Image (spheres, rainbow, N blue to C red):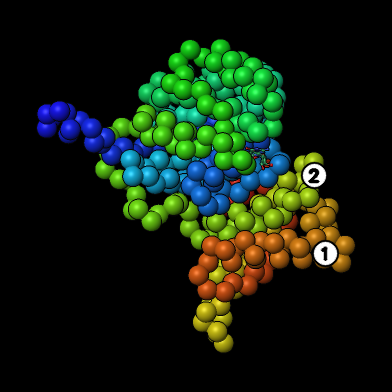
């Protein structure tokens, strides 16, 4: 073998942006967290959990994947819903690779086809199809779903079944996505896994805890802001995190607080535990419940909440 051939054998470093798209609740955020190896985006069984374009960074010897987690695409019913769809559209036009996700156990429907068609708006991006939650179905059902997804577009670079929960084919997915990325210098320092600030991650962890066990419209009505973080005067290794849990109506306040404050207590305890995992010193979480009337439909309030 000549020297030139040997040079060809060392693959160039690749880096770029990827996003997973799909209906709400197909497992996009869980997949990103599994690839990054830490909880960057919160997840829940309720549709439309993701509200921000959260970046998670996957590091390998061969390159870097910057994954932008986007909200699920849905028929918008509020101004918030419209802004979330816009966020997805603008992300699509910016990324190198799009992973279109359908869950293994649900038939492909009009919602999926609509999103698959939207990918035409991103002609530059390479497209792969992912069948998520692969461990929930039989091999035969999985085969049928892979076939069904292969038929909704003819430009898939790859079709991969994955399970974020059982860790199926995650490394195959990383390898495949890296191969589709442009040659590039690293885009982020080797130890950085997200651009999210501590405040942003803490607010999301409070929201995740608050979503647990609430039903109907309430999950959509909940927003969380961090009011302040202060070092304790008597103990500089401890910080107090003051968070506001915002709902849309007085009647929702009672549900969130629970009988004798019991619900709020368990939300506070769970969120404090989760925030503790991502902070250096000790933290104490203090929660306040506030009402911002109909904030999902109010441009001013949306602006204040960062949408
Ligand atoms: N069984 C199984 N469940 C999964 C898997 N991945 C995600 N889930 C579950 O599916 C639900 C939705 O997951 P998310 O990651 O929040 O889904 P999403 O697509 O980001 O949802 P939105 O933010 O609403 O768009 C959660 O209850 C997850 O635990 C998987 O591989 N297997």
Q: Position of residue 228 (x, y in %)?
A: 57, 68
Q: Position of residue 129 (x, y in %)?
A: 52, 24
Q: Residues within 10 Å of mark 2 (few under 14, many from 20)?
A: few
**Residue toward you, 294 or 225:** 225
The reply to whether residue 71 is visible in this rendering is no
Residue at the front extreme?
1
Would you say 118 lies left or right of 61 here? right
Q: Quadrant of the C terminus?
A: top right
Ligand 1 placement by image quarter: top right
Residue at the bottom extreme?
234
Q: Position of residue 52 (x, y in %)?
A: 54, 44
Q: To which quarter of the image does residue 232 belong?
A: bottom right
Circles 1 and 2 in contact, beta carbons < 8 Å: no
**CB of mark 2 near ligand 1 (< 8 Å):** no
Residue bearing the label numbered 2: 215
Would you say 92 lies left or right of 13 here? right
Q: Position of residue 17 (x, y in %)?
A: 40, 37
**Residue toward you, 143 or 297:** 143
Residue bearing the label numbered 1: 262
Q: Residues within 10 Å of mark 1 (few under 14, many from 20)?
A: few
| Residue at 54% over, 45% down | 34
Residue at the left extreme?
3
**Residue toward you, 188 or 70:** 188
């Amino acid at each position: 073998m000549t020297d030139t051939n040997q040079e060809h054998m060392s693959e160039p470093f690749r880096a770029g942006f990827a996003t997973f798209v799909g209906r709400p609740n197909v497992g996009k955020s869980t997949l990103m967290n599994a690839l990054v190896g830490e909880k960057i985006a919160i997840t829940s069984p309720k549709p439309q959990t993701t509200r921000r374009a959260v970046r998670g960074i996957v590091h390998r010897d061969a390159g870097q994947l910057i994954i932008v987690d986007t909200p699920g695409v849905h028929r918008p019913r509020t101004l918030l819903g419209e802004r979330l769809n816009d966020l997805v559209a603008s992300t699509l036009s910016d990324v190198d690779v799009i992973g279109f996700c359908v869950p293994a156990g649900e038939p492909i429907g009009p919602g999926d086809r609509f999103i698959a068609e939207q990918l035409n708006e991103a002609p530059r991006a390479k497209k792969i199809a992912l069948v998520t939650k692969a461990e929930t179905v039989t091999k035969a059902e999985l085969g049928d779903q892979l076939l069904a997804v292969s038929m909704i577009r003819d430009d898939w670079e790859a079709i991969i079944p994955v399970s974020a929960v059982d860790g199926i084919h995650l490394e195959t997915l990383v390898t495949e996505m890296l191969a589709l990325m442009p040659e590039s210098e690293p885009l982020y320092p080797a130890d950085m896994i997200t651009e999210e600030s501590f405040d942003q991650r803490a607010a999301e962890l409070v929201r995740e805890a608050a979503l647990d066990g609430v039903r109907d419209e309430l999950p959509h009505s909940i927003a969380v802001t961090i009011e302040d973080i202060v070092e304790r005067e008597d103990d500089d290794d401890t910080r107090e995190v003051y968070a506001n849990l915002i709902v849309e109506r007085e009647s929702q306040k009672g549900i969130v607080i629970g009988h004798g404050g019991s619900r709020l207590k368990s939300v506070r305890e769970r969120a404090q535990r989760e925030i503790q995992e991502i902070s250096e010193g000790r933290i104490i979480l203090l929660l306040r419940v506030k009402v911002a009337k109909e904030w999902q439909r109010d441009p001013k309030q949306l602006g204040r909440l960062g949408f």
